[in-house]
Amino acid sequence: MSMDAVLSRIDSDLDAATGRLFDLLRIPSISTDPAYSADVARAADWLARELSDLGFDASVRPTDGHPMVVAHGGPEDGRHILFYGHYDVQPVDPLELWSRDPFDPAIEDKDGRKVIRARGASDDKGQLMTFVEACRAWKAETGTLPARVTIFLEGEEESGSPSLVPFLKANAEELKAEIALICDTGLYAEGVPGIVTQLRGLLGEEITVTGPDKDLHSGLFGGIAMNPIRVLTRVLANLHDAHGHVQVPGFYDGVAELPPELKEQWNNLGFDAERFLGSVGLTHPAGEDDRTGLEMIWSRPTAEINGIWGGYTGAGFKTVLPSQAHAKVSFRLVAGQDPHVLRESFRDWVIQQMPLDCHVSFEGHGASPASRMDISHPAFEMARQALSAEWPGEAAFIGGGGSIPVAGYFKTVLEMDALLAGFGKDDDQIHSPNEKYDLDSFHRGTRSWARILGGFAS
Ligand SMILES: [Zn+2]
């Protein structure tokens, strides 16, 4: 059967595949630093050439920033899938904390495991190459791909993706597919892959409460003048009730309960909140007290106070009664919550708590909605079984506490769900010195995509 042949070819080709990944890792494609612009372009050229050699119709597409790489392959009449990865990397400083040159990749031993050490090994060059190598094996064994495949690689993911949405809009016809596959996430646990099916959104607000029109001396005005820090801290204290629920009116409107089968899957993942918190010196979950730990980080919306300042905070002491008090507050959002509606209800709720003589102003900082994938699309269960066949542990549908904006843009701009599967590990040190990717992740990741690709054969 061709799947077995494809998988054995991946096994026997692992050294050569690692060598090709090393070639890509040697290019310092740091997107945020203009000094590396030519290297970012060189990485795009390298990928387009590699994909052309594989028989893809590949091109480097200019944008106002760094270029995109778009490549089409496979049978015209097959099912159409889009694969997304990014070829840019994070800066490497502080360089002295690296055990080797970050752009001189090598296989190293780490606790008895082989790891690929280099900037971008895990995020995201090693991951995107798992898909490219899976395509290579299918081509080599069968002369074609099991489905029509569009590979879409971004060069600005680590610098805020300024060109992404305009590019998606301008090329919607070409990029829209049945489903998007994204490889930029990690395993759920050692040997246990996960498919991320929900990602939280984010809303940020900066609040400034103003009382007196100048800083006052508390010996002179203390007791008679309203202190804006007192006002602000009362507002912030009202954000949560004693059970951890957020008290902004309408905050939970539209927030759906987890489907029972998903809740059961999550409960079976063996998540240990105490152990999770233990790694940061805590013991007790602080979210809504009627929710599990995984619900708190994956499927429930939150409010956090990220910063608070005002008055005198320097050395020594100053009995100032300040004119202003400030705080930064952010909300992690889930599907069903509209960030723009919530921004208005949050502001109204704060304004209503202002006493006489105090007023409040706001500065908005980003408003991205959450995304929840429609896992009734048969590709999700197919991919879950393919991953379960490849890895020691059974794959699970999981949530993501952070945000991966591209998944949301595929949904809003291209009306396409995204299937996020990746093989990174928590100790990969992405964005930090000594980034690595387990050789086993690279190998099994390639085999995983080969299996998933096979599942799209029509
Ligand atoms: Zn990434």
Image (cartoon, rainbow, N blue to C red):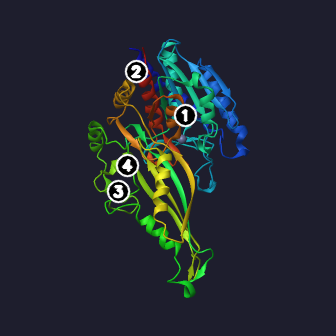
Give amino acid for label 1.
Gly
Residue at x-position 50% and y-position 21%: 137
Q: Name the residue under label 4.
A: 252
Q: Nearer the viewer, residue 236 or 399?
A: 236
SS state under label 2? helix
- The answer to whether 167 is drawn above or below residue 55 in the figure is below
Give amino acid for label 2.
Gly
Q: Is residue 25 visible?
A: yes
> Is the CB–ligand 1 distance for label 1 below 8 Å?
no
Could you tell which of marks 1 and 3 lies nearer the N-terminus? 1
Could you tell which of marks 2 and 4 lies nearer the N-terminus? 4
Q: How far apart are marks 2 and 1 (CA)?
A: 20 Å
Q: How far apart are marks 3 and 2 (CA)?
A: 43 Å
Q: Distance between the residues labelled 1 and 3?
A: 37 Å
Could you tell which of marks 3 and 2 lies nearer the N-terminus? 3
Residue at x-position 62% and y-position 50%: 92
Q: In this view, does 39 lie to the left or right of 160?
A: right
Q: Name the residue under label 1.
A: 85
Q: Mark 2 points at which residue?
A: 455
Query: Pointers 2 and 4 in contact (CB under 8 A)?
Result: no
- The answer to whether 41 is drawn above or below residue 292 in the figure is above
Q: How far apart are marks 4 and 3 (CA)?
A: 9 Å
